[in-house]
Image (spheres, rainbow, N blue to C red):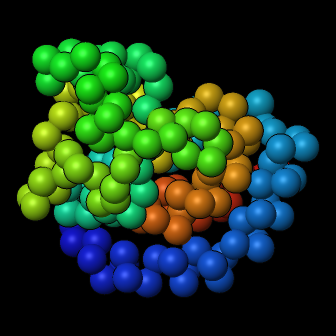
Amino acid sequence: MNLEPKIESLPKLAKDKHNENKKFFAKLKKKPPKNLDYVMQELHDTEFEKTDCLTCANCCKTTGPLFTDKDINRISKHFKQKPQQFIAQYLRIDEDNDYVLQTVPCTFLGADNYCSIYEVRPKACREFPHTDRKKFQQISNLTLKNVAMCPAAFNIVEEMKKRVKI
């Protein structure tokens, strides 16, 4: 599936849906259905059966993940570096005092959209776009950002609004 034309229109589509999504998430937070985790897992799995992230990689091109201490230790070990060397070479501390990449697009993203550290990639990358997370209603602000960059997240939220009655 080619996502390119969609990627170009995604920020506008997400902006158009922003207020609707915000209202929906506010209601969802107040009264999440008992089966929400199950529904979200199903929507997530269905979407990713037909979505090939390698045709897009917009998340890797437009934002950088947060790196936990565990991520830094695992990845620096992979590079046979000391954690401080890895930090100095690739990371910076952001306004929230978190370690993030010095540059975007991601340093580890190849021209073919493959990740050169896929097997040891950060937890934030492994879990993106977080649409299968338990207690999904608690990450609405993150999801509102993600639908503007990830076609799969956008589709999942649109489908969720049809399926989840609140």
52 over 101 or under it: above or below: below
114 over 38 or under it: above or below: below
In the rendered image, the residue lying farthest to the right is 30
Residue occupying image coordinates x 19% and y 27%? 119
160 over 126 or under it: above or below: below
Residue occupying image coordinates x 58% and y 74%? 14
- The spot of residue 1 in percent (x, y) is 22, 67
- The answer to which of 95 and 50 lies nearer the viewer is 95
Residue occupying image coordinates x 61% and y 53%? 143
Res. 36 in view:
no
- The answer to which of 71 and 162 lies nearer the viewer is 71
- The answer to which of 138 and 105 lies nearer the viewer is 105
117 over 165 or under it: above or below: above
Residue occupying image coordinates x 37% and y 50%? 102
Q: Is residue 138 left or right of residue 103?
A: right
- The spot of residue 53 in percent (x, y) is 26, 54
Res. 135 image quadrant:
top right
- The spot of residue 2 in percent (x, y) is 22, 72
Res. 51 image quadrant:
bottom left
Q: Is residue 106 left or right of residue 71?
A: left
Res. 111 in view:
yes
Q: How many marks?
A: 0
- The answer to which of 62 and 76 lies nearer the viewer is 76
- The spot of residue 30 in percent (x, y) is 90, 43
